[in-house]
Image (cartoon, rainbow, N blue to C red):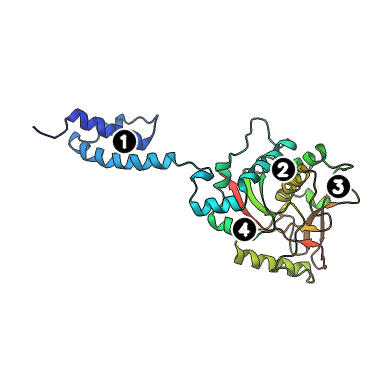
Amino acid sequence: MSNKPSNSSSEDLFAKALMSVAGEGVDLSRVLVQIPAADRTRLGVVLSGLAEEVTKKRSVPTTISGLPEDTKKLVELLKLEEGYDGAVETQKVFQLLRSGESIPDISSVLGVFTPEMLLTAQSFQKPTLTLTTKGRSFNDLVSAMDGHKTISGQNDASVDVLFSQYAKRKQKYWGAHIIEGPFEIETSDFDNVDRLLKERFKNFENAKKVGGFSGIDRWKYAHLMMQALTNKGTLDTELCTLLNEDPASYETRFMGANWCQVRRQVEFRWGDSSANFRVGRFRRSVGGFIS
């Protein structure tokens, strides 16, 4: 008795395997008619193995339970699952979501961070997961803080006129970032507060290249401040965060932000880069946009 499969069973095997690889909803009729029947058995066996691998890839969970063990350990150490819940709560408290918009799930958020980023974030002071909102401008974020005050006696934010540059620029994508804060931070090893600001900026740029991290801009800072405000706290009551990556910052001036305890308000301000500003601090971050 011959063990050779019949033409119909060979074609069934081939068609089923090809469909598994291609996915549902794909019209394969034009592909099938171009392949001689004699070749379909051999190709069917090859595609069956490929289909099995594709199925495995599709079924791998992208939440923390499906991460490689080393990466999973870093995610747990950085408390990113808890951080995600806090970032989502901030979006809700300040009503940042546009109509019809949804918050990226934790799988998408964790997918932003490489193992190298997570290792870098371990060295941060109080690493905090922050989500920057798609479709929101800086003006929108300031309005959200002013419209949803959480601190007793809180006044509207004070925003220097220089921040009117880029103030209407809307974020095209969601962002996921691990940032130092949202608390006061100490001076980093690479920084020297006794130097002039322009020298400190250069030192920070060099440290970024070596350390594999970034700084922050007004969008990241506003979201970080809102996370502090969500918990009835504030950010930079005695210090000021230097917004080294803000597009309005350049060699002769720096942009900064803080909470003014006397005036009970968030402040976005600027200073002369040729001055000494001992209370200024850099905040490191890692992350990127969610595609």
Front in this rendered view, residue 81 or 29: 81
Q: Amino acid at mark 2?
A: Ser
Question: Which sits earlier in the primary sequence, circle 4 or circle 2?
Answer: 4
Of tags 1 and 4, which is closer to the observer? 4
Q: Residue furthest right?
A: 262
Mark 4 residue element: loop
Query: CB atoms at circles 4 and 3 under 8 Å apart?
Result: no
Question: Which sits earlier in the primary sequence, circle 2 or circle 1?
Answer: 1
How many numbered tags mark residues here?
Answer: 4
Question: Which sits earlier in the primary sequence, circle 3 or circle 2?
Answer: 2
Query: CB atoms at circles 2 and 1 under 8 Å apart?
Result: no
Q: In the image, residue 255 lies at what x, y percent?
A: 78, 57
Q: Can the viewer see residue 289 in this picture? A: yes
Real-space Cα separation, disc 4 to disc 3, in angstroms: 31 Å
Q: Which residue is mark 3?
A: 265
Front in this rendered view, residue 79 or 252: 79
Of tags 4 and 2, which is closer to the observer? 4
Real-space Cα separation, disc 1 to disc 4, in angstroms: 45 Å
Work out which quarter of the rendered image holds the C terminus and state it: top right
Real-space Cα separation, disc 1 to disc 3, in angstroms: 62 Å
Q: Residue furthest bottom?
A: 195
Q: Residue 122's mark?
A: 4
Query: CB atoms at circles 3 and 2 under 8 Å apart?
Result: no
Question: Which sits earlier in the primary sequence, circle 4 or circle 3?
Answer: 4
Front in this rendered view, residue 242 or 50: 50
Q: In the image, residue 282 lies at what x, y percent?
A: 73, 60
